[in-house]
Image (cartoon, rainbow, N blue to C red):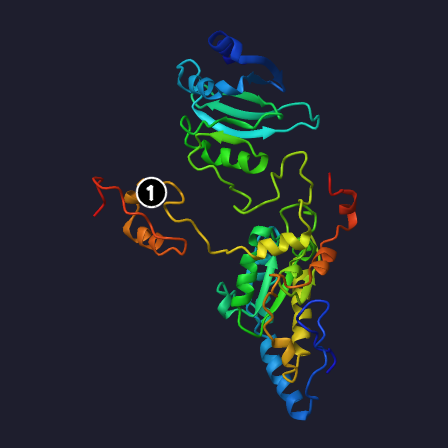
Amino acid sequence: MGVTAEPTAGPGASHIVAPVSPNWVTTRLDFLVNWARSNSLWPMPFGTACCAIEFMAAAASRYDIARFGMERMSFSPRQADVLLCAGRLPFKLAPVIRRIYDQMPQPKWVISMGACASTGGIFDNYAMVQGIDTVVPVDVYVPGCPPRPEGLLYGILLLQKKVRGETLADHAIREERPLDERGLRLSPQLVDELSEPFGNSVHQTRSA
Amino acid sequence: MNPSAAALRAQFDAAITRVTESCGDTIVYVDPTRVREILAWLKDAPEQDYDYLVDITAVEYRDAGLPIDVVYQVFSLRRKAFLRLKAPLDKREPLAIDSVVPIWAGADWMEREVYDMFGITFREHPDLRRILMWETYAEGYPLRKDFPLRGRFSRAEQVRQALGANPEAHYSMEELSIVQAATELPADMRDRLARGERGKIAEPPRGETTDA
């Protein structure tokens, strides 16, 4: 196993150690299952902005994500494997993407495409979620504004690599983690920390 | 200078406080208490004929002593002429102005947006509630100068409140105060609204015709 399976929850999760040690049977079965899963990732496109245009370009004939088994867009979350958030996420859409994520069956992964989905990007303001990882767990972040189709394809290849490193022996990575009693996915301190201004945003004061 | 400015002066005299020209556009400052009367005249007077309301917006200036301007941009489709009206509202008093929905039905959502972003109340508006921000938004009015860029609550609280919203909640007919329109809806749409999770559709008032 070249790549270790990482927990799908964000920072702070403490269940990395597999309860069962992998033996020959599970590793061979893992190889087969992960081969099948990683080569037919059906994306649920959640396109909210210009990144969705690059995503469409990646799906069209020139870049053609059909080469990686992703040509079947799943416009229903119930048949989707990958939630692909392409574009900025306003607070008004946060419950919507959370509902879609909760409706997707396991196994499921999330790609955060572009600067706005990953960090809030240039929209460090009152209306925008500062990174969708404060709302749903994210597996692969694709940087760019917007990322070129090659960038998205590289992110997809990284996700395939991650999927091939998973093991059935670790139940924790496929466990559903609903929002906690506070109604948050992460602790409030962590959400605040992830949403801190950085880069050019630090020049904008809270009272600006 | 747009000749409508002189015509407004002749017609309304004291209600027109100032007329300026900027980048070729005539700007007429008017008394906010008479906005509806002035706009109705501009729309109906045959020699004015400003029949299209392009936009309603508002401006708050950095100088805290200056009033908030409510801006009306009107256009005459026949004469191909623009006119801009500004109605200054004193910030020390409650921000309220007459709605122009009785004149242009299309002003409905524009006034809701100004209310949402600036907190200006439009008197006699049929359905004045937030339009861009969600209904339970409690942080204030985002385009006001005293509103912090990143909002008033912490990011964690903003995320918590956003995730607590029900994305499938919608309005029943009574809440929208357009119950009388129910009789004009197609039957299948009425059924769908009646099954809504936030209450049942009201029975149409007695004596009115239905589409059955």
Locate residue B84, reporting x and y percent: 54, 21
Q: Residue furthest top?
A: B10
Q: Nearer the viewer, residue A60 or B103?
A: B103
Residue A60 is at least partly visible in this image: no
Tell me which amino acid carries mark 1. Answer: Val
Based on the displayed image, in which of its 4 quarters is residue A39 positioned?
A: bottom right
Based on the displayed image, in which of its 4 quarters is residue A179 positioned?
A: bottom right
Residue at 73% from the left image edge and 78% from the top image edge: A4
Locate residue A1, reporting x and y percent: 72, 83
Question: Residue under circle 1?
Answer: B179
- Mark 1: which secondary structure? helix
Q: Chain of mark 1?
A: B
Numbered-mark total: 1
Q: Nearer the viewer, residue A104 or B207?
A: B207
- In the displayed structure, A121 sits above or below B3; it is below
Locate residue A133, reporting x and y percent: 66, 61
Residue at 68% from the left image edge and 88% from the top image edge: A20
- In the displayed structure, B13 sits above or below B151; it is above
Q: Is residue A77 left or right of residue B180?
A: right
- In the displayed structure, A67 sits above or below B18; it is below
The quarter in which the N terminus of chain B is drawn is top right
Residue at 41% from the left image edge and 26% from the top image edge: B103
Residue B53 is at least partly visible in this image: yes
Based on the displayed image, in which of its 4 quarters is residue A87 positioned?
A: bottom right
Q: Residues within 10 Å of mark 1 (few under 14, many from 20)?
A: some
Locate residue A84, reporting x and y percent: 59, 62
